[in-house]
Amino acid sequence: MSSSFQRGRDFGAWLGLVPKQTSTGDRTILGRLSRRGNTYLRSLLIQAARVLLRWATRWRQHSFGG
């Protein structure tokens, strides 16, 4: 990760994968995903997650997950 992202949440916010925040007084309200980040990169992450879920039974065969 780049030095411009101090936390994982900052990177997630850059991608548009964290909930939108609205603050009123001392209360923070989390809304829907903002979807304001890089659309192409976000779609690649979704596709990678789908592949991992589909092939989860073969993870051990390739030394993933223990």
Image: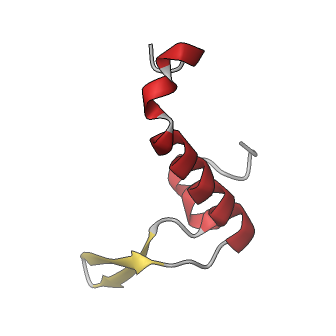
Q: Position of residue 2 (x, y in %)?
A: 75, 46
In the rendered image, the vertical position of residue 66 relative to residue 37, given as above or below: above
| Residue 3 x %, y % | 74, 45
Query: Is 2 rendered above or below residue 13?
Result: above
Indicate left or right for 44 with 31 as reference: right
Residue toward you, 61 or 29 = 61
Q: Is residue 38 visible?
A: no
Q: Residue at x 47, y 66 (%)?
A: 18
40 shown above or below 55: below
The N terminus lies in which quarter of the figure? top right
Residue at 52% across, 40% down: 52
Q: 34 and 10: which one is in front?
A: 34
Point out residue 35 in the picture as x, y percentages from the top left corner. 56, 77
Quarter of the image with the C terminus is: top left
Q: Is residue 8 visible?
A: yes
On the rendered structure, is 44 left or right of 7?
right
Residue at the spot x=53%, y=15% of the render? 61
- Residue 43 point in image, percent of width and height: 64, 65
Visual colour scheme: secondary structure
Number of marks in picture: 0
Image-based side of 28 in relation to 8, left or right: left
